Image (tube, grey):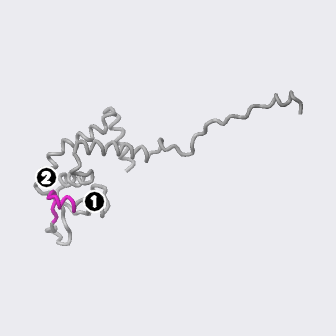
Amino acid sequence: MTKNSSSRRRPAAQKLPQKPPYDLDGQVGFVLRQVSQRHAAIFFNQIGASLTPTQWAALSKLAETGPCSQNHLGRLTAMDVATIKGVIDRLTARGLTETGRDPRDGRRLLVKLTRSGQALVEKLAPNALAISEATLAPLTARERDVFLGLLGKLR
């Protein structure tokens, strides 16, 4: 090999950065989790640590529907059997809900708000509305409608 031929070598090809096979930041589950974490922080800022979002869901749904079976309440609030049982047990221990037999079907247990539970729902309802408002604050009214509509399709 002559001196000239060695000086004519091609430079090593530089590797271009490749797009990763999985971009976490662009994944729906990751984005939804981040939004959910932001919403949870807003919830705890407005409601405090005295109630969890699942407890609030149960209380507010009972205020909306009136007494219902624990199983039905779980379906209405998208909680499995074990979760809704734990939620109702904790709310009942705090005197916010009570359970009793259904007068029309003695085999079925009904859950209902106590007076304290009803009062708490009425007191916290404005805070709950503020939570939704704060969560959606970065969006215009039209974007909110579209966003909520699209989320509803993903249920």
Out of 75 and 12, give the one closest to the viewer: 12
Task: Report x, y in % for residue 64.
Answer: 19, 51
Check disc 2 and give the amino acid type.
Gln
Q: Is residue 103 left or right of residue 145?
A: left
Q: Is residue 46 left or right of residue 7?
A: left
Instruction: Please rate how many residues cluster around mark 1, counting C-alpha atoms within 10 Å: few if below 14, some from 14 to 19, many from 20.
Output: many
Mark 1–mark 2 Cα distance, whole angstroms, equals 19 Å
Residue farthest left in this picture? 115
Residue ID at (31%, 37%): 136
- 16 shown above or below 50: above
Out of 142 and 136, give the one closest to the viewer: 136
Q: Is residue 18 magenta?
A: no
Instruction: Please rate how many residues cluster around mark 2, counting C-alpha atoms within 10 Å: few if below 14, some from 14 to 19, many from 20.
Output: some
Residue ID at (52%, 43%): 23
Give the residue at mark 2. Answer: 118
* Picture quadrant where residue 124 is located: top left
Q: Earlier in the sequence, mark 1 or mark 2?
A: 1
Q: Secondary structure at mark 1?
A: helix
Pointer 1 and pointer 2: residues touching (CB < 8 Å)? Answer: no
Give the residue at mark 1. Answer: 74
Task: Report x, y in % for residue 108.
Answer: 20, 69
Residue ID at (19%, 67%): 109
Q: Which corner quadrant holds the N terminus?
A: top right
Q: Secondary structure at mark 2?
A: helix
Residue farthest front in this picture? 3
Residue ID at (33%, 33%): 138
Magenta span of residues: 89-99
Task: Report x, y in % for residue 95.
Answer: 14, 59
Residue farthest right in this picture? 2
